[in-house]
Amino acid sequence: MIAAPERMPTVTKSTEPDPEELLGYAQISELTGMAVKNLRTYRSTGRLPAPDDPNPIPDRPRWKRATIEHWWVNRPRRGRPPKYMRPPPPSA
């Protein structure tokens, strides 16, 4: 009689993205909703952080997901900052 094969354990992927994952312009565009052209402009004008890639290709820089997420939340914007970013009023 032949024994039934053992079941293989199920491998589940973490739903959390890897903060060390390297992202190129296309992935950053998907993540932020910004056009690739605008991201390239941001980099050339110094408004995007320096690439994190340890082995960079000159025309294909890559950044860690954590770097981009931090930049996206803290980037300067036009107009008045939202209330949660304003300093508290001086107490009397």
Image: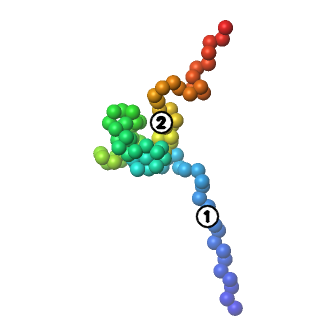
The furthest residue to the bottom: 1
Residue 77 point in image, percent of width and height: 47, 30
Q: Judging from the image, what secondary structure is the residue with disc 1 in?
A: loop
Label placed on residue 11: 1
Q: At 30% across and 46% down in the image, what residue appears?
A: 59
Residue 80 point in image, percent of width and height: 51, 24
Q: Judging from the image, what secondary structure is the residue with disc 2 in?
A: helix
Sequence-wise, the earlier of marks 2 and 1 is 1
Q: Which of marks 2 and 1 is in front?
A: 2
Q: Is residue 15 left or right of residue 46?
A: right
Q: Mark 2 points at which residue?
A: 71
Estimate how packed mark 2 is, as few (under 14), some (14 to 19) or many (20 or more) residues with alpha carbons within 10 Å.
Answer: some
Residue 75 point in image, percent of width and height: 47, 32
Q: In which quarter of the image is the N terminus?
A: bottom right
Structural distance between the alpha carbons of marks 2 and 1: 33 Å
Q: At 34% across and 38% down in the image, what residue appears?
A: 41
Q: At 68% across and 83% down in the image, what residue appears?
A: 4
Specify whether residue 53 is in view.
Answer: no
Q: At 48% across and 47% down in the image, what residue appears?
A: 31
Q: Name the amino acid type tagged 2.
A: Trp
